[in-house]
Each structure stands twice: as C-alpha cells, then as structure tokens.
Image (cartoon, rainbow, N blue to C red):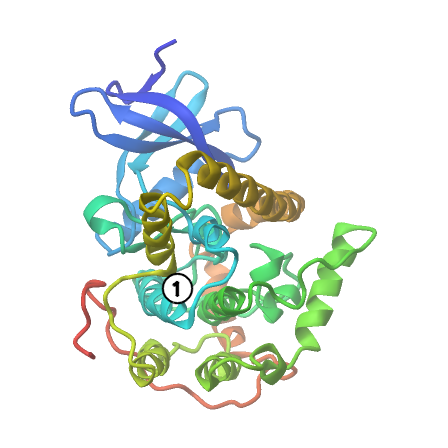
Amino acid sequence: MDLRVGKKYRIGRKIGSGSFGDIYLGTNIISGEEVAIKLENTKAKHPQLEYEAKVYKALSGGVGIPFVRWYGTECDYNAMVIDLLGPSLEDLFNYCNRKFTYKTVLLLADQLICRIEYIHARCFIHRDIKPDNFLMGIGRRGSQVNVIDFGLAKKYRDPRTHLHIPYRENKNLTGTARYASVNTHLGIEQSRRDDLESLGYVLIYFCRGSLPWQGLKAATKRQKYDRIMEKKMTTPNNILCKGLPSEFLDYMNYIKTLRFDDKPDYAYLRKLFRDLFKKENYRYDYVFDWTLYKFQLEKQRAQGKVTDGENNQENNDQQQQQSQQVQQQDAQDQQQQQQQQLQDSQQQQKHFADPRYQNQKAAMYTPNQNYHATSQKVPPPAQPQANAGNPAWL
C-alpha cells in the first residue's frame, strides 16, 4: 500500500519512537528527498503532536533545530514531516562501546550548551534532556548536533511581558528519571537550571559510561524514582565527578548555585570546557570517536583482518543488545510518567491567560533553601551563538 501524507510524502519503514508518537522514514515523491515523518493516532486521549509542531515552529531558524516541512491530519493520524537526521548520541555511544573520549565529550558539550541556550532564549525549556534526544546531522551537516522531541517542552517565560512562571511545588516528575535534576525529583517546577543540570549528567554519563543511580531495583516505579532521587541527593558533586577534569565539577557546582528564575551564564559554562579543550591541545576538527572508530574498521577491512560480515554481525549484535537494554529501561520509566506529563503540558498553555498570574509574581522568587549552595546572582549571559562552525576562541 502506498501511504502518503501532505500529498507528496510517502511513508516508509519505522525508524524510531518519540514522546507520544512513532517516527517513519519518508520520501518526497517529487524531489526524492528523504524526510522523517512522525505519526500520532487522532484517537489518542491527549494528542500532543500539534503542540510539538508549534514548538518547532517557534524555534525555527535556530542552528540544530529541525525544520517542519508539513503538519496536518491524514486518515486516522496526525502527521508531522520534519528534516531527516542521523543517529542519536545514545546510538553512537553504544557504537563506541559506551565510552567517549574527553575530546568527543568537549566537542559535544560546546554545541549542546549553545543549543540549550538558544531554546531558552526563545522562552522554552526542553524538560527531557537526554542522549536519545540529540541527533547528529547527515551529509554536509554530519558534525552538527540537533535537538529533537519537544513534546514535553514548556514556556518558562511570557515572550511579551518576559515574566517568569511562578515557583511551584508538588509537581510530578516530567522527563527521564536517569537525567532529571534533583529539584525535578523533589517536585519543584522546572526552569532553565534544570535543563543544564540534566546536561551535566549527560556529559558525565558519556565520560564514565554510566551514572551511580543506574540499575537500581525497587518493587514499584514510585519506589524506584525515590531510590534514584535518594542516590542523587547523597552523591556529592565531588564524588560524581571524581577522576574527571575539574571543569566538570565546576560545571555541576555552578548549576547548583542557580535559583529558580536565574538566567544561567551560558558563556561561562562554554568557557569552562573550551579552556579545558585548549589545555589538552585538542583540534577542533569535528573528528569524533565514532569517526575514528569507523575509519579503523575500514582500515582493518582493507588489510583483510576483519570481513564485512564478521564486523557487521559482531557490532550489530552488541549494539542491539546494549541499545535494547537502555531503551527498555527508559521506555518503562517514560510510560509511568506520560499521563502527568500530558496533563502538565496542556495546563501550561493556559497559564499565561490566567488573571491570577500577575498576583503570583512574588512567588517566582521563592528559593529552595535545602538545595541552593549560595544565593549568588549570576551575571547576564552572552548572546546565543549564531552557528556551530569553527569557533573564534581557538
């Protein structure tokens, strides 16, 4: 059967899943260009794809933000046609035997901080920062990191008045437990600091291969989340970052100083890792670990040491097993959170229209005294970078 959306996009094989929808390979029947098509059943109890498409539109034009070519309804499905991208950082992490070198982590960190800064500059927070939601580009943009899956994104600030959303508590966990901030576990409304704390956990995960709270067992999901929270809260930053360059500890310590409505100093965070990059005499050549790994395999094939069949079978088996384990665990966690996440995403769209909002302004400055190491106010950040090209700082 020839399934099409938007009259000119043919639906092919399934290539992945995201928040509240499956993703398929698509083809523009006029130009032959390949695209990604995300489908959501129109009978879904809480449809989210239209909201996600609107977030993409609000963020359009930014480096590393996929472009939505078409959104609409076909038969029983809502469909979003978007740029086709390459593998996720989680896929590449598995490909590289679940360990990245510092050079690769620093190359990624520089782009990831820029991406998050841009999203924040457009008045959104992502709320699900994790390796699966960062995809490398393809072709000429193969070294560019892209951000996807904005189904849980939320406005933290009114774009007209610039008023920050108020501080609130008793919120259910939104996002992925492994990378969620401590405040998110505590039920505190998320803000910019939480995206950056999650990014810190992602970077440490890439350096170490795992995080201390992975693999914890419990009778129920609620108990499991509580165990993860307890482990995070009882693991000091100096232990979490033990053996890593001091810049990772500096990053995590800085994030913990941020108050709910503070504007992070993104330039300072970038500089931390850029200075480390220069100190280690790395070259900003976009040669990542997976680039070298692929080159080494091709060299071995040329020398007859590894055949395509042997290499493909071994790599595929290993990657499939590792990827399935990670995805199964994350999928189980995500399933338990979806109901509250859906309700929360819908409620946030009505927030700024509420006349009580102005009366709540004072609440937004309420700090979490149990969590902040200092009440220091951070300096204003630099403007978001225009691109991810060869930086002037080298």
Q: Is residue 32 above or below residue 275?
A: above
Quadrant including the N terminus? top left
Task: Name the residue that disc number 1 marks.
Answer: 157
Q: Answer yes or no: is residue 119 visible.
A: yes
Q: What kind of element bears circle 1?
A: loop
Q: Residues within 10 Å of mark 1 (few under 14, many from 20)?
A: many
Identity of the residue drawn at 55% across and 81% down: 243
Q: Nearer the viewer, residue 42 or 1?
A: 1
Residue 175's x, y, as percent? 56, 54
Q: Is residue 374 above or below residue 371?
A: below
Q: Quarter-wise, where is residue 9 in the image?
A: top left
Residue 2's x, y, as percent? 34, 11
Q: Answer yes or no: is residue 48 visible.
A: no
Question: As drawn, is 389 to the left or to the right of 5?
Answer: left
Residue 209's x, y, as percent? 56, 63
Looking at the rendered structure, the kind of residue marked 1 is: Arg
